[in-house]
Amino acid sequence: MSIIEPEASIWYTCCVLVVFVRLISRRIHHGAWKNLQADDYIVMLGLMTDTVVYAVMHIVVRSSSNLIAPQDDASQFTAQEIASRVYGSKLVLVVEQMQIATTWLMKAALLLMYQRMTILLPQHLWVKVTVVYVALGFVVMEILYFGVWCRPFNQYWAVPPNSSQCNAATNHLITNAVFNISSDLMIIAIPLPLLWQVRIPRKNKFVLMGIFMIGLFTIAAAIMNKYYSFRNPFGTEWTIWYLRESFTAILCANLPLTYPLVQRVFKLRNWSAQSYGG
């Protein structure tokens, strides 16, 4: 069994179920599938990109890449081993980009939800500021990744590469951590005042607080995957933390919008439209 199993499959199954429940809940809330909103389609796309991360990571943990251990002599590699490392390096690139896509799509979905929830509230300005920061962070990070850190681009899978930025990718990992973690903190700060301003039962507020605490775990996972990437770049500990980050990001973005179906199944008390997020 893969070192990321069975945990990865459990997380992935939970994410698929939560997204499925969210979409049915949105159908109930809006009355028709055609009335789904932009963030609903964004989370579907995010689930697709995360499916790629989940599937490809199973291959990555069993593959070698152009990140060559100090005790290995690249000049002694056979043609077959070089080809295998080239293939593994390309898969690492795919995982990294699909991971970025998943996390940033979930940020976008959350911000669209908060945009509706805060339309008449002072927090709406903070939502706009966060949107600009999230978009700017994504653009800057991708420009640096594709056009600056590793040149020419095919050095990302060269064996051996001409720079450590093409295999260890230290500059990219730092840039990603800065924009990813800081934007997550900005997003998490948005709903905190709403928990005390929206008139819903206290027990429901605690439920919401629990859901958004998942966002803190997402940040912790982002920190841990970078920690292991730096501390033990030749190990595989970072792989499960990459998955945990993307999976918890999906849960955080979708759990708040699953209530209509949960309410119908368990006959729970109705929440206000404002608390649901439109």
Image: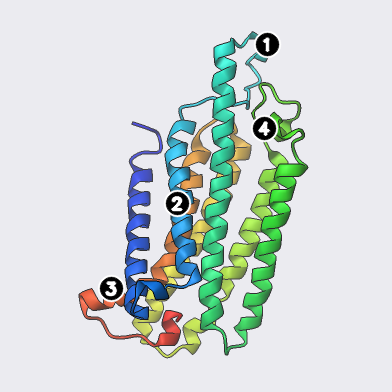
Query: Which amino acid is tagged 2?
Result: Met
| Residue located at (68% from left, 11% from top) | 75
The amino acid marked with disc number 4 is Tyr
Give the image quarter of residue 115.
bottom right
**Mark 2 or mark 3: whose residue is earlier in sequence:** 2
Earlier residue among tags 3 and 1: 1
Residue of label 3? 262
Q: Earlier in the sequence, mark 4 or mark 1?
A: 1
Q: CA distance from mark 3 to mark 1?
A: 60 Å
- Label disc, if present, on residue 75 of the rendered structure: 1
Q: Nearer the viewer, mark 3 or mark 4?
A: 4
SS under mark 1: helix
Q: Is residue 226 above or below residue 83?
A: below
Q: CA distance from mark 4 to mark 2?
A: 24 Å
Give the x, y percent position of residue 22. 36, 68
Marks 2 and 1 in Cβ contact (< 8 Å): no
Q: Crowding at label 4, few (<14), some or many (≥20) Cα neighbours within 10 Å?
A: many
Residue under label 4, please give it: 156
Q: Earlier in the sequence, mark 3 or mark 4?
A: 4
